[in-house]
Image (cartoon, grey):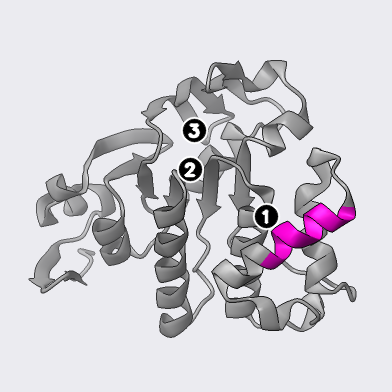
């Protein structure tokens, strides 16, 4: 479904080759500065100077408009700040701007998405006063409203407390049950990725260092990626990761 070849940007990512099939949820991990967020933004051609090929369903992203890309891919950032008063409902209308449909139909889609994501109570709140957890739920709702087959999630839970983070991952799993979503998600929450993803890609120094199904990620592999030892323990359906000490 997604074909990426030779994707590069400056000195940050180098000749990334990647294929993702329809319906996969792929985790992207690596140390800070490894190029994870840059990879997602480069897929969307956010940066000037990106080289390489990005093809989704036989559509070359360099040959189609930004509106066409917006109908293919939703992007959920690690943080989103609004410094002015705009109701959540009005913000969600912007997720339908590429469809040129009447407002009544968009309103129905927003109501349905809010019900699915549990954000109905937030629809008339101002975006400016939302908590971090509420904001990420609204961004998830926006992605549902946008109705694209691919989601790129860039550390969407990095600023959330443990409960809000768990709620986000659970909600993402529920949404994926009802639609054949393809998801690429950058996260430092390795236990959640090992449980919820079918495959994890590890970046190191801007290149793919490891790409395998989640069951192949052992403590020794994680040590190679992060440079510290890990103790990996299965606890029922959960996985516990205990990092060791950093060698000086």
Distance between the Cα atoms at labels 2 and 3? 6 Å
Residue at image position (65%, 83%) is 131
Instruction: Residue under label 3, please give it.
Output: 13
Distance between the Cα atoms at labels 1 and 3? 31 Å
Local packing at callout 3 (Cα closer than 10 Å; few below 14, some 14-19, many 20+) is many
**Residue 79 appears in view:** no
**Numbered disc in front, either 2 or 1:** 1
The foreground one among 114 and 247 is 114
Instruction: Please tell me the numbered disc located at residue 35.
Output: 2
Q: Position of residue 35 (x, y in %)?
A: 48, 43
Quadrant containing the N terminus in the rendered view: top left
Residue at image position (20%, 60%) is 228
- Residue range (magenta): 103-111
**Numbered disc in front, either 1 or 3:** 1
Residue 106 is one of the magenta-drawn residues: yes
Instruction: Residue under label 1, please give it.
Output: 145
The foreground one among 135 and 79 is 135
Distance between the Cα atoms at labels 2 and 1? 29 Å
């Amino acid at each position: 479904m997604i074909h990426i070849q030779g994707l590069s940007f400056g000195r940050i990512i180098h000749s990334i080759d990647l294929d993702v099939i329809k319906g996969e949820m792929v985790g992207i991990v690596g140390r800070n500065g490894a190029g994870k967020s840059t990879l997602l933004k480069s897929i969307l051609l956010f940066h000037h100077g990106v080289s390489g090929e990005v093809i989704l369903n036989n559509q070359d992203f360099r040959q189609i408009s930004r509106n066409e890309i917006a109908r293919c891919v939703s992007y959920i950032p690690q943080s989103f700040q609004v410094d002015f008063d705009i109701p959540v409902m009005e913000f969600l209308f912007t997720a339908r701007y590429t469809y040129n449909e009447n407002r009544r139909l968009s309103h129905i889609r927003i109501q349905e998405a809010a019900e699915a994501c549990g954000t109905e109570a937030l629809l008339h709140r101002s975006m400016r006063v939302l908590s971090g957890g509420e904001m990420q739920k609204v961004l998830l709702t926006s992605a549902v409203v946008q109705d694209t087959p691919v989601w790129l999630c860039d550390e969407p839970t990095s600023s959330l407390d443990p409960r809000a983070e768990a709620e986000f991952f659970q909600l993402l799993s529920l949404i994926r049950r009802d639609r054949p979503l393809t998801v690429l998600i950058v996260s430092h929450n390795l236990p959640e990725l090992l449980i919820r993803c079918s495959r994890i890609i590890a970046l190191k120094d801007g290149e793919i260092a490891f790409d395998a199904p989640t069951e192949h990620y052992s403590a020794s592999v994680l040590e190679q990626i992060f440079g510290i030892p890990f103790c990996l323990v299965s606890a029922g359906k959960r996985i516990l990761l205990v990092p060791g000490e950093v060698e000086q």
